[in-house]
Amino acid sequence: MGGSPVTEAVRSLEVRWIFPGQLEGAVAGWFGRFPARTESRQDTYLLDPPLPGLSVKVRGGGSLEVKVYGGSPGILQMAGRARGRMESWQKWSFPFSPLRQENAGPAGWRPVCKRRRITRFLLPGGRVVAYASGKGQEPACDVELTEIRTCGQDWWTLGFEATGPASLLRVELEAAVALVFAQAMPSAVELGPAASWSYAEWLCGGRESRCSGVAGGFSSGLLP
């Protein structure tokens, strides 16, 4: 970080779908055909005051993450399998002391518990390859299947995040999407634009009523 407490901006191209309810075992098994790393953490999002075009969260209690929305280049389509809104973002991270976790925590913030399974897709020599992890600096597309619990409710999400040079972002994203959806998802859920949200838009977009209280732990146990 060159002596500065702030990381350099990371540019990304993302698409995400978010669904209510617990993650189905068949979907977890579908994703399990790729090597993946797993992690569980609580992220805490700033919802009030509303900040259009910004996503602000405390990531796992260790850093403050600020993302700036850069617009959408359109709809990503995988014929017969998935359609979702692509979103451009820039992200900065700052070292940060943990927020208090007792009771509901600071006013205006929403805790979200996540159990994540993440696969990294790289394009060495123009051929897409899946890894459980990588060096973190090379151009790549991270794909996550995540169980969510917030406000006492269960949700799950499938998300793609391509990072690296701007000229490669769409190539990385489309290559990962093509490989993941080469096999159809075994579920009745519709991977369409109506379910395609960023976390910030989903939390502020009226799909949940406002509520208080720290989110509880996970109970489904579908991911190791």
Image (cartoon, rainbow, N blue to C red):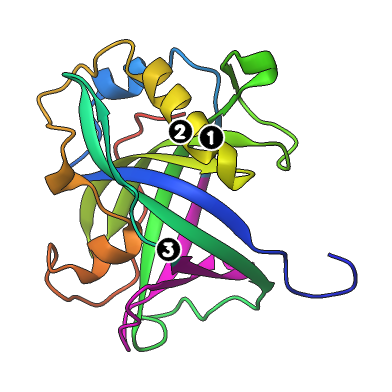
**Which quadrant would the N terminus be assigned to in this image?**
bottom right
- Judge whether residue 20 can be spotted in this image: no
> For the residue marked with disc 2, what is the amino acid?
Leu
For residue 154, above or below residue 171: below
Q: Which residue is mark 3?
A: 70
Amino acid type shown at disc 3: Gly
Q: Marks 1 and 2: in contact by CB < 8 Å?
A: yes
- Disc 3 crowd, CA 10 A, few/some/many (<14, 14-19, 20+): some
Q: Magenta stretch? A: 40-68
Q: Nearer the viewer, mark 1 or mark 3?
A: 3
| Picture layout, residue 84 above or below residue 114 | above
In the image, residue 102 sits, relative to residue 24, either above or below, namely below
Amino acid at dot 1: Cys
Measure how far apart labels 2 and 1 are at the Cα level.
6 Å
Q: What residue would you read off at disc 2?
A: 173
Residue receiving disc 1: 141
Q: Earlier in the sequence, mark 3 or mark 2?
A: 3
Q: Secondary structure at mark 2?
A: helix
Which of the numbered marks, if any, corresponds to residue 132? none
Q: In the image, is residue 121 part of the stretch drawn in magenta?
A: no
In the figure, residue 81 lies in which quadrant? Answer: top left
